Image: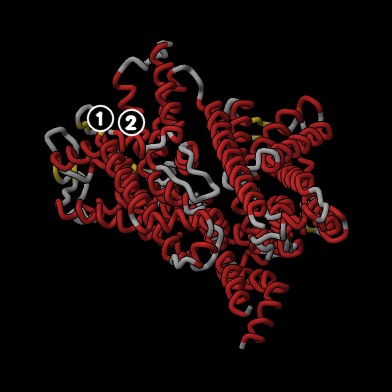
Amino acid sequence: MSRRADLFWRYWEKFGILAILVVALVVFAILTPSILTIGNLLNVMARSAIVGIPALGMTFAICSGGFDLSVGSIVGLSTCVWASALPAVGLIPATLLTLAVGAVCGLLNGLAITKLKIVTFVATLSMSMVFRGVALVYTDGAKQMINRSEHPEAKFFSQSVNVFGQPVQLTQMLMLVAVFAAGYLLYRYTRFGVYTRSVGSHEVSARTSGIRVDRTLILVFVLTGATAAMSALITASQLMQGAATLGVGFELEVITATILGGTSLAGGRGNIWGSLMAAVMLTLTRNGLNLLGLSDEYQRLAIGVILLLALAISGIQELTKEARQ
Amino acid sequence: MRSLVKKVDFRELGIFYALIVLWLVLIVTGAPGFRQFSTYQSILQKASFMGICGVGMTLCIASKHFDQSIGSMSAFLGCTFVMLLRAFSDRPPQEQVGVTVRPDGVEYMGITWTGILAAFLITLALGVLCGLFNGVLVAKLRIPAFIATLGTLYVLRGSAYLVTDSQPYVINQQITEKQYALFKYLGTGVILGLPFSFWVMILCAVAGGIVLRKMKLGRDTLAIGNSVEASRISGVNIDKTKILVFTLLGGFVGIAAILNTCYLASENAGMLQGFEFDVITTVVLGGTALAGGKGNIFNSMSAALFFATLTVGMPLIGIGTYPQRIIQGAILLFAFSINEIRAQMESRRVKAGARRAAALKSATQP
């Protein structure tokens, strides 16, 4: 029995999220057959970039034993920065500036965690309030609209290109693929990735074996902030506006994607591939619920339920592991 | 008197002194509104909702846990309360509106006193159930509290939209004039010059204080906050304690939600977003360390007053809504770093003491 359970969990870790994705697809295909059109599926995959890219950053954060609850606020602030800077300085400088703002937000998170010694989730929680407040003060609560005819280049991040007769949001898809490929290499083959994992699995022993824990953690949060800003670029480009209220509760989706993907809350063990799959799965769920005509609040409810289920599954997994030992 | 002085450690009351100083400064500098009693009444009113939840949250944080879901929970409970009042109205829905008219001209549906009592009790019970659910997630499934309650935050918020079907509701359409007077009293009534809900907060704080200082549950809470392993070895039922702490918090949130609904005389599913930040901020400002194992209800209440003074006072002295968010975040960061730094200094002192004792021991032993 215990060996069979063992085998089950091993396969679950590898293919569980794939199974969930297939189940979700089948369920939605029965409820709303229109979800199965190739155009829609390509659209879902491209749109997964919005959740997927910050989920990569979050995978590093959770793997390092931390947490980032300020992702939503960073997205809000970044859209404001991009939308207000773009008409003034052009696409590329505005984009670089936005990424820098995201990175600086992450840096502040990292400094609060390592230098003020505040527990990560609390530090990022308080920081999220500060970031949101800064965005509100900066815009004075007003939406930053981008004029479509004056600045057609602002559509860059959400452009549709015809591929084999289907409109595909190519930039987003390429960004998603590039970020995850880079993330995978970073996680698997670089010193930074190894350090992140060892800090997450045991901070004290990482410190005693000479790893610069503080620097690693700060870099992890800078990475998370930057990925949040990238996601903000896509959102702002899609809506052609920036608003301080964008991304409220967005961290829920990002965290759900990461945990559903199999990254362990205990730290030290991330699953990059799983986060990508989970991001696609969540986007599919939202898309399906949208097609069923459910409003945003109910979609959030569904995502909350999915998060609790994912947590329950990983909790049960830990419990069976403990029982075995 | 002497024993009282001995029992209360005055060094621990930092936030209480800060509150007094803040009020004195505001009065002396003549900040607008702060020489009127009504301002303080509205501060007490605002503080009481935070304070009532703060009692439960103090226990929760003292056990080294954390509940992010209480904002959504109070919205959900408030919505359920209003919907229950509607459901218990003794006329069928299609005849409800326009059937009877009160002397003040408001149309009402008519609900029995039993119906009102049932609505109160069911709402409280639901609060307890929500807390129980959080507790089971944390204790039985071993999900870290802050992420488990992040999940319930969204589930409860969604449920609030679900029960009200995204519609706002006003209380006074359900009830007769006498009943309206009751709700008005619960919401904005005044006893001895102080708001009714403030007295409820004092009652809750006393009850919480008794639980924390005198009862086994309180000792167990502090014990698991200090060290789960040590308390497991000394026979504390850890899962039970955790579940009870969250359940209690749910009950307090239920009380606060009902009072808040009566205060506003209306309810909609989107309200009280971010309320959990306020409550957590006050509890941590009150010196209850996130590291667990410490908690002081009186300080949490003082901090609730302090915080309410800021939220009521900032608009009065001309600070807009948006900068308030930054200030609140900064206060939260400050509170956390102060507590963490103090905890670290303390642990360093303890360690140094232990080292000295060990050195002494080895020196005296032949």
Whether callout 1 and callout 2 share a subunit is answered yes
Q: Which of the two residues, A136 or B331, is positioned nearer the viewer here?
A: B331
Q: In which quarter of the image is residue A280?
A: bottom right
Within 10 Å of the Cα at label 1, are there few (<14), some (14-19), or many (20+) other Cα atoms? some
SS class of the residue under badge 1?
strand
Q: Which of the two residues, B158 or B239, is positioned nearer the viewer here?
A: B239
- Tell me which amino acid carries mark 1: Leu
Image location (x, y in percent) of residue B199:
26, 37
Q: Which of the two residues, B78 or B249, is positioned nearer the viewer here?
A: B249
SS class of the residue under badge 2?
helix
Specify whether residue B291 is in view: yes
Q: Distance between the residues labelled 1 and 2?
A: 8 Å
Q: Name the residue under label 1.
A: B194
Specify whether residue A46 is in view: no
Q: Quadrant of residue A9?
A: bottom right
Image location (x, y in percent) of residue A187:
81, 58
In the displayed structure, B352 sits above or below A206; it is above
In the displayed structure, B262 sits above or below A6; it is above
Q: Which quadrant holds the C terminus of chain B?
A: bottom right
Q: Mark 2 points at which residue?
A: B44
Image location (x, y in percent) of residue B129:
37, 60
- Image-based side of B48 in relation to A185, left or right: left
Identify the subunit bearing mark 1. Answer: B
- Tell me which amino acid carries mark 2: Leu
Residue B330's label in the rendered image is none
In the displayed structure, B316 sits above or below A152; it is above
Identify the subunit bearing mark 2. Answer: B
Residue ID at (16%, 46%) = B99
